Amino acid sequence: MNDRFNKLLQLNTSGLGCWASIILTVFILTSVGLGWIVNGFMILIALFLIVPVVAFWGFQWWLKRKLIQDRCPVCSYEFTGFKNTEFNCPNCGEALQVEAQSFSRMTPPGTIDVDAVEVSAQTIEESN
Ligand SMILES: [Zn+2]
C-alpha cells in the first residue's frame, strides 16, 4: 500500500508519469462510469438520511421490547420499568421485578436464591 503510493508519487514528479496518471484516472472514471459515482453519492446521502431514522425506530423498538408498563401490585400505581431488572415502585418503594409481562413483588427475604449465594462467594474472594 505504502510502496504503491511512493511509486505513484515518483511517477507524478516526471511529466510523462503525470500524463499517465491523468489518462489512467480518466480511463478508470469512464470505464467505471460517472453515473456510478453519482449513484454512489446518492446512496451515501440516502444512507445519511435513512440511518438516523432507522436508528430512531430501532431504538424505539428496542425500548418497547425492554420496557414494560404495568401497575404496582401493592399500590396499583402505573409506571414503566425495564425488563430483567429489579426496581422499586416510585410511589410506595416496594421492591419489584418483571414476571410474565407484569410487575410482581420480589421474593420475600429469607428464601435462598442463586444471586445471594454468588454475592457471598464474591465477598470471600475479595477479603483474601
Ligand atoms: Zn407501589
Image: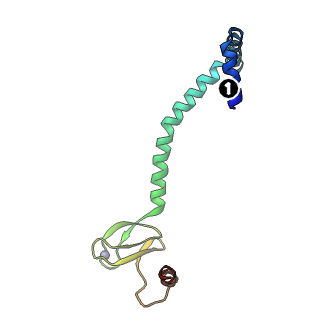
Cβ of mark 1 under 8 Å from ligand 1: the answer is no
At a point 69% along the width and 21% down the height, the residue shown is 8
Residue 5 lies in quadrant: top right
Viewer-side residue, 3 vs 71: 3
Viewer-side residue, 1 vs 96: 1
Seen in the picture, residue 23 relative to 103 is either above or below; the reply is above
- Label 1: how many residues lie within 10 Å, few (<14), some (14-19) or many (20+)? few
Left or right of 45 on screen, residue 86: left
At a point 32% along the width and 73% down the height, the residue shown is 89
Q: Which amino acid does label 1 sit on?
A: Phe
For disc 1, the marked residue is 5
Seen in the picture, residue 61 relative to 7 is either above or below; the reply is below
**Residue 117 placed where, x, y %?**
51, 85
Q: Residue furthest bottom?
A: 110
Q: In which quarter of the image is ligand 1?
A: bottom left
**Residue 95 placed where, x, y %?**
36, 78
Residue 24 lies in quadrant: top right
Viewer-side residue, 104 vs 51: 51
Viewer-side residue, 96 vs 125: 125
Number of labelled discs? 1
**Residue 58 placed where, x, y %?**
49, 50
**Residue 110 placed where, x, y %?**
42, 91
At a point 47% along the width and 82% down the height, the residue shown is 127
Question: Quick one: SS at disc 1?
Answer: helix
At a point 60% along the width and 26% down the height, the residue shown is 39
Residue 44 lies in quadrant: top right
Colouring used for the render: rainbow
Image quadrant occupied by the N terminus: top right
